[in-house]
Amino acid sequence: MSQKLYYENLYAREFDAEVLNQYEHDGKFHVILDKTLFFPSGGGQPFDTGFIDGVEVKEVLEKNGEIIHVLAGGLNNKKVHGVLNWERRFEFMQQHLGEHIFAGMLFNLHGLHTARMRIEGGNVSIDIDTPVKEEFIFEAEAAANEAVWRDIPVEILYPDIEEVKKFARKLPPENAELPIRIVKIEGVDYVPCCGVHVSSTGQVGLIKITSFENHKGGTRIYLKCGAAAYRWLASFYSEVRKAETELVCGYESINDKILNLKSQIKDLKNENEKTLEKFLRPLAEDLAENKIIKYVMKNSSQDDVKHLFRLITEINREAVALLACENSEGVFIMFGTNRDNKNVDVRPAFKKAISILDGKGGGSSFSAQGWGKNSEKLSAALDEAEEEVKKFYEI
Ligand SMILES: [Zn+2]
């Protein structure tokens, strides 16, 4: 079995080893060494990458106690030299210990158990099987960061199983090999784990919650630790700064400014609606004198058409309106009648017209709308639609 150098010296980046076995498997090169610094996936932590004798290590697996290095090519020598992608490994060590500290605090403060956790890229997420209150999450975050500042050393212990059962935040799986490896942070956490972590809490640097959501009846919490937390905050602030510049305010006022703008938009919309009403009502009254109304609004929007439609069908509840507008987005049509008018179904007319216009849309018997492309065929489409609607009046 390979010697696990990654447990013996957490900070070693390079090592010498002997090749015990190498073979091709599914077109990939599998290499087994007498000892290795390459951590295989485990305890929610992804595998290390790097190079062995200059050949890229793409993946590292552990199978039946054997560490398998999946390489991009074969190795020529029996004695080889391995180099870790240290940046990746160190970030995982930061994130992993950060996860222990935060999960430990959720447990210590509120008795919440972490059911699952994963580390992916710069992200750590943990799942709690019950809903977690927002203030509990931020309390644990604050306590976790205080534990970081205290720079508590991480102890690796192999106690007997009775002690594990007594003190551990969660129990190891039933079939776990003994002795159980315990990662202990005095006063913070005591948990079985096969991962590799930085050797003291201070090296985690920072623990930041970045989001949380309901997940299968419980809560999923996302956090970032160390270098990943710093990168996230840096990009976060650069975005906030853009908003500060745009809104001409400090970040504390961004929300108030947005609420203010939203209320201004609402007022403007109301005003616009009133103006439109003033212009459209005389037109609607005119048009509503007919039973079937074909009308194309020039230089108008979809909202204008809808407004005119509402006015006409309120003024004349028997009338059928075949309305359209053309603009840079294409041609919009809206057909219908008052919803109380059960004598007409505008869908056959709409289907015919929208197919002539090569468009998409739909609706109910009293109202259908959609956008089309063939604006040059608009008048033909309206004529066809009128013929369809007339059928309901000839019966
Ligand atoms: Zn762990």
Image (cartoon, rainbow, N blue to C red):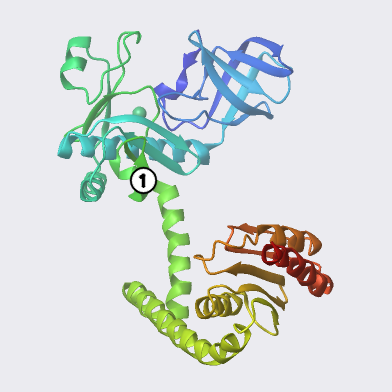
Horizontal and vertical percent position of residue 273: 48, 84
On screen, 151 above or below 392?
A: above
Lateral position of residue 190 relative to residue 173, left or right? left
Work out whether residue 353 can be spotted. yes
Q: How many marks?
A: 1
Q: Quadrant of ligand 1?
A: top left
Nearer to us in this view, 125 or 357:
357
Residue under pointer 1:
213
For residue 84, side relative to residue 175 (left or right): right
- Viewer-proximal residue among 200 and 80: 200
Measured from the top left, where is residue 220 in percent x and y? 35, 40
User: Viewed as shown, does residue 107 lie left or right of 174?
Assistant: left
Q: Is residue 350 left or right of residue 46?
A: right
Where is the C terminus found, in terms of image quarters? Answer: bottom right
Three-letter amino acid code at the position of disc 1: Glu
Q: Is residue 18 above or below residue 354?
A: above
| Residue at the image point whose x is 41% and y is 40% from the top | 124
Q: Is residue 221 visible?
A: no
- Depicted 22 relative to depicted 136: above or below: above
Q: Quadrant of residue 386?
A: bottom right
Identify the residue at horizontal 17%, vertical 22% (top origin).
167
Of all residues, the one furthest to the front in this rendering is 395
Q: Residues within 10 Å of mark 1 (few under 14, many from 20)?
A: some
Residue 35 in the image, given as x and y percentages of width and height: 52, 15
Q: Is residue 327 above or below residue 198?
A: below
